[in-house]
């Protein structure tokens, strides 16, 4: 199976079996959606009326919070099971949003310059080349639009195991190509999914190539000093698992793709 089929199957299973990654927005979170979405102060004070793309973001959480905050929301995901959670929660809460099943590196179902904001949680590790993703994001964003994204740190994906001294061993080369091999240490890895390592020059340089300027950069702290050495929080003391970026599209590349937007599914109360 190719990476798309494999990852669709993996994420369908996660969604269908009640994974933590398929946790829908709670009532408490919906009472203060922007506070939940934006602990770093990267979003405008209001997003009411903004056109927002939640990319590779199915699961009934992010898209729901944006819709509650008043945005016009489109959520794209490869997993139909994850999208069904968005549809179910939108219907239950009387929200309007659009769901589209597509891969993050091929958004040909979406037209050019449709969105003011693209928000993408950790997911670029599931495609072999991140540059087509950034190219598609630049195409569907309007100039001066924001792209907020989170990615797996390359060094985190290089970890293979923990030795007898509880030291974390880098067992994957930084310039590794192709799918990542299975490892003893599966912290921050999703069962059944195929993942790829993207270097910093891919993640940051790839954005710059598309006309983005990185306005902020963070490394979320996942260290926990109260847990056992086998816990992922212990590993977080030594290896940062994620990086977050706020980028703004300052210019469009000359080549853009003209496409006919797909209708998707629209939930209207």
Image (tube, rainbow, N blue to C red):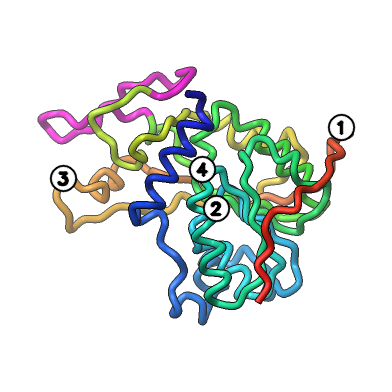
Front disc: 2 or 3: 2
For the residues labelled 4 and 3, the Cα–Cα distance comes to 26 Å
| N-term mark: 2 or 3 | 2
Tell me whether circle 2 and circle 4 mark residues in contact (CB < 8 Å): yes
Q: Residue at x 16, y 29 (%)?
A: 163
Tell me whether circle 4 and circle 3 mark residues in contact (CB < 8 Å): no
The image shows a total of numbered marks equal to 4
Left or right of residue 100: residue 249: right
Above or below — where is 67 with respect to 78? below
Label 4 neighbour load within 10 Å: few <14, some 14-19, many 20+: some
Q: Position of residue 145 (x, y in %)?
A: 76, 55
Circle on res. 255? 1
From which residue to which does the magenta span run? Answer: 158-180
Label 3 neighbour load within 10 Å: few <14, some 14-19, many 20+: some
Q: Quadrant of the C terminus?
A: bottom right
| N-term mark: 2 or 4 | 2
Left or right of residue 232: residue 11: right
Q: Residue at x 73, y 33 (%)?
A: 209
According to the image, label 3 marks what residue?
229
For the residues labelled 1 and 4, the Cα–Cα distance comes to 25 Å
According to the image, label 2 marks what residue?
57
For mark 2, give the secondary structure. Answer: loop
| N-term mark: 4 or 3 | 4
Tell me whether circle 1 and circle 3 mark residues in contact (CB < 8 Å): no
Q: Residue at x 69, y 60 (%)?
A: 52
The image quadrant of residue 211 is top right
């Amino acid at each position: 199976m190719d990476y798309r089929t494999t990852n669709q199957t993996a994420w369908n299973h996660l969604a269908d079996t009640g994974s933590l990654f398929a946790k829908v927005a709670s009532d408490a979170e919906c009472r203060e959606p922007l506070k939940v979405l934006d602990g770093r102060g990267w979003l405008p004070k209001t997003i009411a009326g903004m056109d927002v793309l939640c990319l590779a973001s199915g699961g009934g959480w992010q898209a729901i919070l944006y819709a509650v905050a008043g945005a016009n929301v489109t959520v794209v995901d490869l997993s139909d099971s994850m999208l069904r959670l968005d549809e179910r929660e939108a219907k239950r809460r009387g929200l309007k949003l659009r769901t589209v099943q597509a891969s993050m590196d091929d958004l040909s179902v979406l037209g050019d310059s449709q969105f003011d904001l693209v928000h993408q949680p950790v997911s670029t590790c599931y495609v072999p080349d991140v540059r087509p993703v950034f190219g598609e994001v630049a195409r569907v964003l309007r100039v001066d639009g924001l792209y907020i994204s989170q990615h797996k740190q390359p060094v985190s994906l290089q970890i293979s195991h923990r030795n007898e001294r509880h030291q974390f061993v880098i067992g994957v080369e930084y310039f590794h190509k192709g799918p990542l091999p299975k490892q003893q240490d599966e912290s921050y890895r999703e069962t059944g999914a195929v993942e790829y390592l993207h270097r910093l020059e891919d993640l940051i340089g790839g954005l710059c190539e598309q006309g983005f300027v990185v306005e902020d950069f963070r490394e979320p702290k996942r260290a926990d000093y109260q847990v056992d050495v086998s816990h992922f929080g212990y590993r977080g003391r030594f290896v940062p698992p994620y990086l977050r970026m706020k980028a703004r599209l300052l210019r469009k590349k000359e080549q853009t793709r003209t496409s006919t937007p797909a209708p998707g599914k629209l939930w209207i109360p």
